[in-house]
C-alpha cells in the first residue's frame, strides 16, 4: 500500500500553517513582529517539513524517533527566533507558545465540519477560519488580562544599553509619525540620558530649533526627525523624535515587545511626583 505525496503541496500547506502559527504566537505574547520576519520563519518551517519528509523516504524512520523529534524542536525554535524576533532569554517561552497554538489549531481543524476534505481550496478556507477564530480569542484574552492597567514598566534598548522607566498607557495618545506611519510614544529626556550621549541629546534640540544636526553612526541609526503635535487643550508645537532598537512593555501578565519604536522626546516632566516618565501610545498596546 502506498500513497502519492507532492512535495510542492507539502511545502505550500506547511508554509501557510506556519505563517498562521507565527502571527498568532506574536499576538499571544504581545510581540509586534514585522511581516517579512514572519514570512522568513514560515519558510524555515516549510523547508524543514520537506526535509523531514524526504529523509523519512530515504531513511525509513518513524515520527517518534528521537532524531525526528529533535529536528522538530530545533525547527520550532528557529521559527520562533526568526519569525518572532525573540532573543535567547525568551526563546523557550515562545517555542512553547508555538506548540500550544499548533495543538489548538489541530483541535479546531478536527471539530470544523468538512475538515476531512483534503482539497487545497478547503485547506485555505479552514486555515483562514482557524486564524480568525484563534486571533479573536487571543485578542480577547489580552484585553481581559490587562484590563484596568494604566501604569506599567517599560524597558528601552539602544545598541546593547537598556534603561527602565514607568509608562502610562494613554488611550488618548494616538500620535502617529508621518515619516514611518508608526505610533509615537513620548518620553522624558532624562530617561534617555543613560542610553544616549549628552551631545547627541543636545543635537536633537538643535535640530528642532535650528535644523543643525551632528553626524555619526549612532545618530544615523536613530533616524532623528521632528514631529508636529497637538494636545487636547489646543497647544501645538514640535518635538524631536528618534527610533530606538527595542522597547519591552510589562503590562499585567502581558509582555509586549515593540521593535524600532518611535519616541518623541520632552523636556517637561509628565507627573508632578514622577509617577511615570513615558506616555505610551494608545495603539501600541
Image (spheres, grey):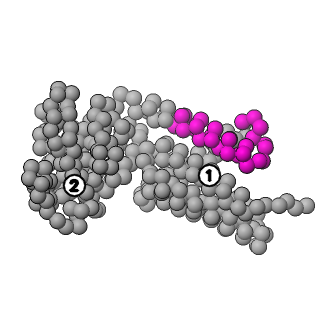
Q: Which residues are magenta?
A: 112-138
Residue 147 percent location from the top left of the image: 39, 29
The residues tagged by marks 1 and 2 sit, at their Cα atoms, a distance apart of 37 Å
Q: Is residue 139 left or right of residue 284?
A: right
Location of the N terminus by quadrant is bottom right
Q: Is residue 185 above or below residue 15?
A: above
Task: Name which residue lies at 78% across and 43% down.
Answer: 116
Residue 267 magenta-drawn?
no
Task: Name which residue lies at 20% across and 31% down.
Answer: 231
Residue 182 percent location from the top left of the image: 34, 45
Per the rendering, the mark at residue 77 is none
Q: Is residue 245 left or right of residue 230?
A: right
Location of the C terminus by quadrant is top left
Q: Which residue in the structure is indicated by mark 2?
A: 224
Residue 119 magenta-drawn?
yes
Q: Secondary structure at mark 2?
A: loop
Q: Which residue in the structure is indicated by mark 1?
A: 16
Between residue 183 and residue 144, name the one nearer to us. Answer: 183
Amino acid at each position: 500500500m502506498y500513497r502519492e505525496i507532492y512535495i510542492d503541496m507539502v511545502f505550500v500547506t506547511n508554509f501557510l500553517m506556519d505563517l498562521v502559527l507565527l502571527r498568532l504566537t506574536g499576538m499571544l505574547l504581545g510581540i509586534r513582529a514585522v511581516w517579512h520576519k514572519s514570512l522568513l520563519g514560515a519558510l524555515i518551517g516549510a523547508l524543514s517539513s520537506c526535509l523531514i519528509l524526504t529523509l523519512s523516504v530515504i531513511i525509513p524512520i518513524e515520527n517518534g524517533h528521537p532524531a525526528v523529534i529533535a529536528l522538530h524542536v530545533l525547527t520550532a525554535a528557529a521559527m520562533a527566533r526568526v519569525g518572532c524576533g525573540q532573543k535567547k532569554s525568551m526563546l523557550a517561552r515562545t517555542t512553547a507558545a508555538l506548540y500550544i497554538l499548533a495543538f489548538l489549531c489541530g483541535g479546531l481543524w478536527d471539530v470544523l465540519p468538512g475538515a476531512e476534505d483534503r482539497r487545497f481550496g478547503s485547506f485555505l478556507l479552514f486555515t483562514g477560519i482557524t486564524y480568525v477564530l484563534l486571533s479573536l480569542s487571543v485578542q480577547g484574552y489580552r484585553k481581559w488580562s490587562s484590563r484596568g492597567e494604566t501604569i506599567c514598566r517599560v524597558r528601552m534598548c539602544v545598541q546593547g544599553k537598556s534603561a527602565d522607566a514607568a509608562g502610562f498607557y494613554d488611550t488618548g495618545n494616538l500620535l502617529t509619525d508621518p515619516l514611518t506611519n508608526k505610533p509615537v510614544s513620548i518620553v522624558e529626556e532624562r530617561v534617555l540620558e543613560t542610553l544616549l550621549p549628552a551631545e547627541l541629546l543636545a543635537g536633537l534640540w538643535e535640530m528642532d530649533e535650528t535644523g543643525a544636526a551632528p553626524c555619526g553612526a549612532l545618530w544615523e541609526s536613530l533616524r532623528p526627525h521632528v514631529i508636529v503635535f497637538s494636545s487636547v487643550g489646543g497647544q501645538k508645537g514640535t518635538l524631536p523624535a528618534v527610533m530606538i532598537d527595542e522597547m519591552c512593555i510589562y503590562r499585567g501578565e502581558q509582555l509586549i515587545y515593540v521593535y524600532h519604536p518611535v519616541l518623541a522626546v520632552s523636556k517637561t516632566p509628565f507627573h508632578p511626583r514622577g509617577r511615570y516618565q513615558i506616555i505610551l501610545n494608545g495603539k501600541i498596546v
